[in-house]
Image (cartoon, rainbow, N blue to C red):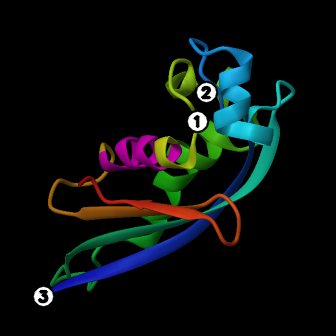
């Protein structure tokens, strides 16, 4: 029997969507106001879901405190109140779109979880715009 447990979290961050190898005109045409050279911010909401077998001794799929600690170290401490383009190494050469952010978060968290647990990360950039990634 496999069960999914989930935890919500959030972080606030600024970013600019643009490609260094494109002209300003092309960046404006593709990314619009998200290409603001002075950046813009979001109050990101996150749902981290872990699926696995229930441990017969503890009754847990994963200790929620352990999951909370992984989210804090890998997401909140790394991204909260940061300029993603400037202060987060993963986005030095990667456009910080919601799609790329969710994959980066997934990869950072997956590396900290036991191999027998499956992971899905859902990232809300706005209350109506969100992306999900589960390693596929």
Name the image quarter holding the N terminus.
bottom left
Cα gap from disc 3 to disc 2, whole angstroms? 38 Å
Residue for badge 1: 96
State yes or no: discs 1 and 2 in contact (Cβ < 8 Å): yes
- The mark lying in front, picked from 3 and 2, is 2
Q: Position of residue 68 (x, y in %)?
A: 52, 62
- Pointer 2: residues within 10 angstroms few (<14), some, or many (20+)? few
Q: Is residue 42 left or right of residue 120?
A: right
Note whether residue 2 is visible: yes
What residue is rendered at 80% in x and 45% in y? Answer: 41
Q: What mark, if any, has residue 127 been given in the picture? A: none
Cα gap from disc 1 to disc 2, whole angstroms? 10 Å
43 or 4: nearer the viewer: 43
Residue for badge 3: 1
Q: Is residue 48 left or right of residue 36?
A: left
Residue interval drawn in magenta: 101-110
Q: For residue 118, which quarter of the picture?
A: bottom left
Residue for badge 2: 88
Helix, strand or loop: magenta stretch: helix
- The mark lying in front, picked from 3 and 1, is 1
- Magenta region includes residue 103: yes
In the depicted structure, whether residue 92 falls above or below residue 68: above
Q: For residue 50, which quarter of the picture?
A: bottom left
In the depicted structure, whether residue 88 falls above or below residue 110: above
Q: Position of residue 10 (x, y in %)?
A: 67, 60
- The mark lying in front, picked from 1 and 2, is 1
136 or 4: nearer the viewer: 136
Cα gap from disc 3 to disc 1, whole angstroms? 37 Å
């Amino acid at each position: 029997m496999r069960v999914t447990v989930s935890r919500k979290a959030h972080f606030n961050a600024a970013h600019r969507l643009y490609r260094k190898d494109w002209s300003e005109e092309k960046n404006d045409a593709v990314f619009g106001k998200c290409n603001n050279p002075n950046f813009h911010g979001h109050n990101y909401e996150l749902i981290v879901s872990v699926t696995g077998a229930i441990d017969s001794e503890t009754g847990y799929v994963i200790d929620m405190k352990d999951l909370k600690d992984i989210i804090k170290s890998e997401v909140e401490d790394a991204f909260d109140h940061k300029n993603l383009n400037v202060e987060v190494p993963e986005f030095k050469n990667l456009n910080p779109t919601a799609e790329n952010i969710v994959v980066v978060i997934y990869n950072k968290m997956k590396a900290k979880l036991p191999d027998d647990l499956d992971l899905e990360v859902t990232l809300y950039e706005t209350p109506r715009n969100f992306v999900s990634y589960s390693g596929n």
